[in-house]
Image (cartoon, rainbow, N blue to C red):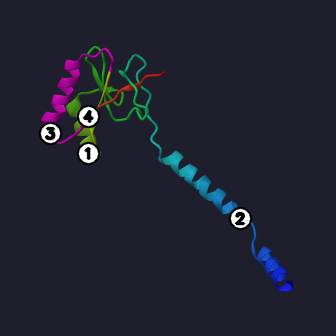
Amino acid sequence: MAGSLSMRAKGRRATRAEPTLPLINVVFLMLVFFLVAAQVARPLDGALDLVKTDDPQMVPPADALVLHADGRQTWRGAQSSMSAMLEGLAAEGYDGPARILPDRNASATQVLDLARTVHGIDAERRIVIVTQRALP
């Protein structure tokens, strides 16, 4: 019986609290990493009224061609065209999908014309139409 008590006492002395400071440091470093690595989206033009969808994962991309209701096309805040945008992205080494951000009042033919332009320049490139999630 005395032997079992001494075993328990040894077990208690051997266990000690886990240090929390290294854990806090790791969590803090992860937080800093994600804040620095996160891409900050540029604000959209206030006059732009996006198409609404129910996709909860929608995040407006920074590199999208904006199609306004009057037919104007802007990219990164300046007047542009789909071919100029694709050339600019290719120069930066971007090979992802071509993103089109249409105004809700833009005509479907204008959106299709942009898609045809992408297909004519690079038939393998995917095309993404960016919309805004509808609020419940």
Please name the amino acid that badge 3 sits on. Ala
Residue 115 sits inside the magenta stretch:
yes
Q: Residue furthest front?
A: 1
Span shown in magenta: 103-127
Residue topped by disc 4: 85
Q: Earlier in the sequence, mark 4 or mark 3?
A: 4
Q: Secondary structure at mark 3?
A: loop
Asked if disc 1 and disc 2 are in contact, CB closer than 8 Å, the reply is no
Dot 2 amino acid type:
Pro
Q: Amino acid at mark 4?
A: Met
Q: Which residue is mark 3?
A: 123
Residue 97 vs 79, above or below: the answer is below
The CA distance from mark 4 to mark 1 is 12 Å
Residue under pointer 1: 95
- Tell me the residue that label 2 is attached to: 19
Foreground disc of the pair 2, 4: 2
Between disc 2 and disc 3, the foreground one is: 2
Q: Secondary structure at mark 2?
A: loop
Query: Which of the marked residues, 1 or 2, is nearer the chain's N terminus?
Result: 2
Determine the secondary structure under disc 4: helix
Q: Amino acid at mark 1?
A: Asp
Image coordinates of residue 21 in percent, x first then y, are: 69, 61
